[in-house]
Image (cartoon, helix red, strand yellow):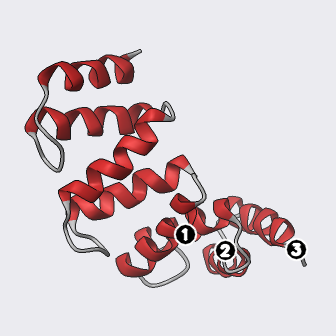
């Protein structure tokens, strides 16, 4: 089956609350390079849905999807760096990935990036820039 078929079947299993099957299908599609499946498999690992809770595995698959430009994965990866879940805590990498997602228009990433900029965590402190990102998130 194609990665897209595996992913679609994984979504159906997820909707049916068949979490073990969904995680398995997302994993198969993820290993074939499907960005949304990589993100969904990361989320399964991040939440312990159908697989044991595994922040390191979640971070690995988030990185794969983030590298393909998937905004949701960039945000999850940023979170893993910010809180040190699955990756070593690193404010600069958290700011980098939140910034990528923020610049693609994701409101929660804009807010989180603004927070980091306002506090100078991982990026130079800049009140005006932080305010711009907070305004973007609010709009």
Q: Is residue 111 left or right of residue 25?
A: left
Residue 81 drawn above or below residue 29: above
The residue depicted at 60 percent of the width and 68 percent of the height is 38
The residue depicted at 28 percent of the width and 23 percent of the height is 134
* Secondary structure category for the residue under label 2: helix
Earlier in the chain: of badge 1 and badge 3, it is 3
* Secondary structure category for the residue under label 3: loop
Residue in front for this viewpoint, 18 or 40:
40
According to the picture, the residue beneath numbered tag 2 turns out to be 30
The residue depicted at 22 percent of the width and 74 percent of the height is 88
According to the picture, the residue beneath numbered tag 3 turns out to be 2
Please tell me in which quadrant of the rendered image residue 26 appears: bottom right
The residue depicted at 74 percent of the width and 77 percent of the height is 32
Distance, label 2 to label 3, CA atoms, is 11 Å
Q: Position of residue 115 (x, y in %)?
A: 19, 36
According to the picture, the residue beneath numbered tag 1 turns out to be 64
Q: In which quadrant of the rendered image does the C terminus lie?
A: top left
> Tag 1: Cα neighbours inside 10 Å, few (<14), some, or many (≥20)?
many
Whether the residues at callouts 2 and 1 have beta carbons within 8 Å, the answer is yes
Earlier in the chain: of badge 2 and badge 3, it is 3
Q: Is residue 27 left or right of residue 77?
A: right
Please tell me in which quadrant of the rendered image residue 59 appears: bottom left
* Label ID, residue 109: none
Q: Position of residue 82 (x, y in %)?
A: 23, 58
Q: Mark 1 vs mark 3: give the one in front.
A: 1
């Amino acid at each position: 089956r194609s990665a897209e078929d595996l992913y679609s079947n994984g979504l159906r299993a997820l909707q049916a609350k068949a979490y073990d099957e969904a995680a398995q299908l997302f994993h198969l599609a993820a290993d074939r390079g499907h960005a949304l499946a990589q993100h969904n498999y990361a989320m399964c690992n991040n939440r312990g849905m159908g697989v044991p809770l595994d922040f390191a595995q979640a971070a690995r698959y988030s990185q794969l999807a983030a590298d393909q430009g998937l905004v949701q994965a960039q945000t999850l990866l940023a979170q893993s760096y910010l809180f040190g879940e699955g990756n070593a805590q690193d404010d600069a990498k958290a700011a980098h990935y939140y910034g990528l997602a923020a610049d693609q228009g994701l409101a929660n990433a804009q807010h989180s990036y603004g927070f980091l900029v306002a506090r100078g965590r991982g990026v130079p402190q800049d009140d005006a820039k932080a305010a711009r990102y907070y305004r973007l998130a609010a709009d």
